Amino acid sequence: MIYYRAKSLVQCIIISRMYGLNVILLQDPKLLAALAESQRRQAPYAGAFLVKDEADSNTEKNINDLKGKELLNQLHEVGTLAQITSIQGEQVVLIGHRRLRITEMVNEDPLTVKVDHLKARH
């Protein structure tokens, strides 16, 4: 069973997996700047979301070239709240904490969304 907690805003990071400690490379300078700013403000968190597996997709665009709603539509709505432990150039180190669900888009570039925090009820 799942219940929802307080809403918050997070920048979206595209991942291929999320297990414990993850090192990812980001090439989007706006996203890197937003994550660095979050870290400076003592709020070092982002939302990490997997890309939907759509083998029948006609789009030839690389997922890294998508922005806004086009990108949002390619992401799973449930992801992971990830703590940003360090940023060195394009390398970002994340630790996964809990599940999130996207509720709405707030900003297109970098993609920023409102999320509900999900927690399993015991």
Image (tube, grey):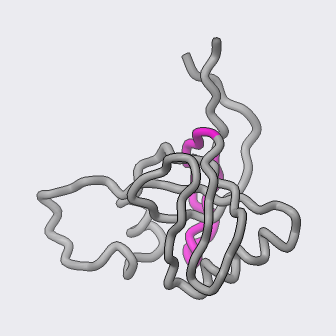
Task: Where is residue 45? Give x, y as percent.
Answer: 71, 58
Q: Is residue 81 left or right of residue 54?
A: right
Quadrant for the N terminus in the image:
top right
Residue 35 position (above or below residue 19): below
Task: Where is residue 56? Give x, y as percent.
Answer: 12, 58
Q: Residue at x 15, y 57 (%)?
A: 55
Residue 32 position (above or below residue 5): below
Q: Which quarter of the picture shows residue 109?
A: bottom right
Q: Residue at x 56, y 69 (%)?
A: 111
Residue 10 position (above or below residue 91): above
Q: Residue at x 73, y 50 (%)?
A: 8
Outermost residue, right direction?
41
Q: Is residue 85 left or right of residue 12?
A: right
State which region is magenta.
98-115
In this rendered view, identify the residue nearer to me: 17 or 63: 17
Q: Is residue 101 in the magenta section?
A: yes
Q: Is residue 6 left or right of residue 19?
A: right
